[in-house]
Image (tube, grey):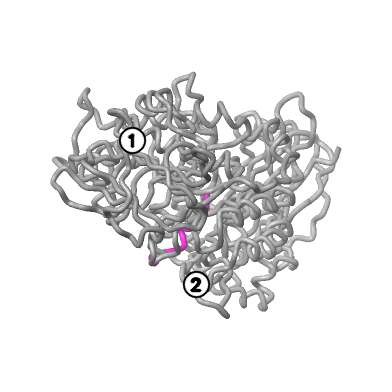
């Protein structure tokens, strides 16, 4: 377990993908005596001491030795094992003493305590070999991916104990059957890495290698992921390489210098978030982040990383006024070091973990986010379509009377829908900070709110792109998400909310059952407009199909965004023949009016516009209907 010259060389050039196996706290045997070896990177420290409950937190008792001139310090502690609390007491060049948690620590205390905990990650027997093998062979772009975004601390809570967090085992017992029943393919967990402040939702990380103690031990989290995989559910986590908090025991000014962050505040601080920005140009810092990604995928079998705040990494002037940022060496606003880091990240993940996906939360028009690295792109598998989300929610929150004036909010997304591999998110960010819940955003009385909600979620399911729904949205929770309490599960006692939940279940199953909706959603050949320009009546419709030569049927998906029924509405059809209605958002089963009694319609062989056939439908109010050509 000792650190070799090769380890130090690779770390120094930023290419030691498993440096977490060397730095931090690791079981070791020296001269036949078992114990723990501690190592930390603090190149500008004058001294480093190990403190903990084993030496009564005496900051002079246990000195670490610098390895050559590497900036890495280490010490072996005999007869010390898992469960021991520790920190590093670092003496700066100015003689000040600072206590820091282990940047590579595998476990931390539950807040408000903040010491690192010696942990042994070995010894867990995984039972997901079949899942991992299948994952290596799947094609993510052509597979159905419907993500249920979960904040484990507030999905459900246990009010009979304090703190009220469910354990990973309790979450598995309750969350897995719920996700399976509703038909989601993956869950995305926010707040997994250790963070001191609950209200940050896990986006201000201090224990980058430590699953949060809120829900149990590292082995407990492994068992949770294992159980998800055995049930056929993939697990994504939110991963935060864009910034870190200023807390005194964290990475900020780690060895008395700006070690992990830029020294110049114009590049090293997010003023609006009150956080520090990683110095992506420093090899060891880039190595810290890349190896952290490898760690979660290797040690915890995570299936994908949703990379937070990518836009803030790509642009040096992000959320800054003129004069508050420094251009790159060419005078531009792009953060070239961060771009190189993201490319290295995605190449490394692809090299070690075939089938594992990376997803960029990226809100700008930066080109090539999902283009492979070897073709000049950033190399992500998917990108969150923030433009679609903003336009769609703007449209759906309008009174239907005014939607005719903003029809472009629906049609514009198709101008770029296939320029990247997109995920369509209705995430936690859209139901906090006064934005209201999805259901409460909708206009009208309760019936119309529910109908508009069904129209919104139906449009998400039918629009090309993978899907994401934040917890609570699937049953139409009325109030905004609150991270300090569980979801409003009592709402399901009301039939309206059960019906909205049934609607989400039906959409997930439609999406999974029909390759027309998922196997071609990143290719123009899988999509064709049926009705794009009827802004006056706020009707739009399109066809979804498989790629040429793959067979299957055609799905005709029609939306009426007003409460006015449209009888005898004529659309083009790809072929004459019989079409069956396979889903109706206005069905009484989902809380609708049951207006349209059509179940099967024959398209006649009469040309309509540029189609060889035409079909005549009765469109229900505020609803989506889906028709499949009968084979």
Query: Which residue is painted at 59% across and 44% down in the image?
Result: 302
Query: Which residue is painted at 64% across and 44% down in the image?
Result: 145
**Residue beneath disc 1:** 72
In percent of width and height, residue 600 lies at 83, 50
Most distant residue in the front direction: 31
In this rendering, position of residue 568 left or right of residue 286: right
Q: Are marks 1 and 2 in contact (CB under 8 Å)?
A: no
Residue 483, above or below 255 = below
Query: Which residue is painted at 28% across and 45% down in the image?
Result: 48
Mark 1, mark 2: which one is toward the viewer? 1
In percent of width and height, residue 580 lies at 81, 48
Residue 174, above or below 49 = below
In percent of width and height, residue 194 lies at 45, 55
In percent of width and height, residue 533 lies at 54, 42
Q: Rate crowding at label 2 as few (under 14), some (14 to 19) or many (20 or more) other CA atoms within 10 Å.
A: some
Question: Which numbered disc, 1 or 2, marks the residue that appears first in the sequence?
Answer: 1
Residue 7, above or below 483 = above
Quadrant of the image occupied by residue 448 = bottom right
Magenta residue span:
425-434
Q: Is residue 149 magenta?
A: no
Q: Rate crowding at label 1 as few (under 14), some (14 to 19) or many (20 or more) other CA atoms within 10 Å.
A: many
Quadrant of the image occupied by residue 525 = top right
**Residue beneath disc 2:** 479
Residue 54, above or below 295 = below
**Residue situated in front as seen by the camera: 435 or 221:** 221
């Amino acid at each position: 377990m000792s650190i070799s010259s090769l380890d130090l060389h690779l770390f120094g050039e930023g290419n030691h993908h498993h440096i977490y196996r060397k730095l931090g706290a690791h079981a070791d045997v020296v001269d036949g005596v078992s114990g723990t070896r501690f190592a930390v990177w603090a190149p500008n420290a004058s001294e480093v001491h190990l403190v903990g409950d084993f030496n009564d937190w005496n900051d002079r008792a246990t000195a670490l030795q610098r390895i050559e001139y590497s900036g890495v310090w280490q010490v072996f502690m005999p007869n010390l094992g898992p469960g021991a609390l520790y920190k590093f007491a670092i003496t700066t060049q100015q003689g000040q003493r600072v206590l820091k948690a282990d940047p590579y620590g595998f476990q931390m205390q539950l807040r408000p305590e903040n010491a690192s905990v010696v942990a042994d990650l070995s010894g867990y027997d995984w039972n997901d070999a079949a899942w991992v093998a299948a994952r290596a062979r799947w094609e993510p772009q052509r597979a159905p991916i419907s993500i249920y975004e979960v904040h484990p601390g507030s999905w459900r809570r246990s009010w009979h104990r304090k703190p009220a967090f469910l354990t990973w085992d309790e979450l598995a017992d309750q969350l897995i059957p719920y996700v399976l029943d509703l038909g989601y393919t993956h869950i995305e967990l926010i707040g997994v890495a250790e963070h001191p402040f609950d209200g940050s939702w896990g986006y201000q990380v201090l224990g980058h290698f430590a699953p949060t103690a809120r829900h149990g031990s590292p082995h407990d989290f492994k068992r949770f992921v294992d159980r998800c995989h055995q049930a056929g559910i993939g697990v994504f986590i939110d991963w935060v390489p864009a910034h870190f908090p200023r807390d005194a025991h964290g990475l900020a000014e780690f060895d008395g210098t700006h070690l992990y962050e830029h020294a110049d505040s114009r590049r090293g601080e997010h003023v609006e978030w009150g956080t520090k920005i990683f110095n992506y140009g420093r090899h060891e810092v880039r190595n810290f982040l890349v190896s952290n990604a490898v760690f979660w995928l290797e040690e915890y079998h995570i299936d994908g990383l949703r990379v937070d705040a990518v836009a803030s990494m790509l642009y040096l002037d992000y959320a800054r006024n003129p004069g508050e940022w420094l251009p790159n060496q060419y005078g531009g606003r792009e953060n070239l070091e961060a771009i190189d880091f993201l490319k290295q990240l995605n190449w490394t993940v692809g090299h070690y973990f075939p089938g594992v996906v990376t997803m960029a939360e990226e809100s700008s028009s930066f080109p090539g986010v999902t283009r492979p690295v070897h073709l000049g792109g950033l190399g992500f598998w998917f990108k969150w379509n923030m433009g679609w989300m903003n336009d769609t929610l703007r449209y759906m929150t309008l009174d239907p009377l005014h939607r005719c004036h903003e029809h472009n909010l629906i049609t514009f997304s198709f101008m770029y829908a296939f320029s990247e591999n997109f995920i369509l998110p209705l995430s936690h960010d859209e139901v906090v900070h006064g934005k209201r819940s999805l259901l409460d955003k909708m206009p009208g009385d309760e019936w119309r709110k529910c109908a508009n909600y069904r129209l919104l979620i139906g449009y998400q399911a039918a629009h090309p792109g993978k899907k994401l729904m934040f917890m609570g949205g699937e049953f139409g929770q009325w109030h905004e998400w609150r991270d300090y309490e569980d979801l409003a599960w009592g709402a399901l006692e009301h039939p309206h909310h059960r019906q909205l939940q049934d609607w989400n279940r039906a959409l997930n199953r439609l999406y999974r059952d029909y390759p027309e909706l998922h196997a071609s959603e990143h290719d123009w050949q899988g999509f064709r407009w049926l009705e794009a320009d009827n802004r006056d009546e706020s009707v739009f419709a399109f066809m979804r199909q498989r790629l040429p030569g793959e067979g299957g049927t055609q799905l005709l998906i029609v939306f009426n965004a007003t409460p006015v029924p449209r009888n005898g509405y004529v659309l083009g059809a790809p072929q004459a023949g019989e079409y069956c209605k396979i889903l109706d958002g206005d069905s009484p089963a989902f809380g609708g009016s049951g207006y349209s009694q059509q179940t099967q319609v024959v398209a006649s062989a009469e040309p309509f516009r540029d189609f060889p056939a035409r079909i005549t439908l009765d469109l229900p109010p505020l609803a989506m209907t889906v028709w499949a050509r009968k084979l």
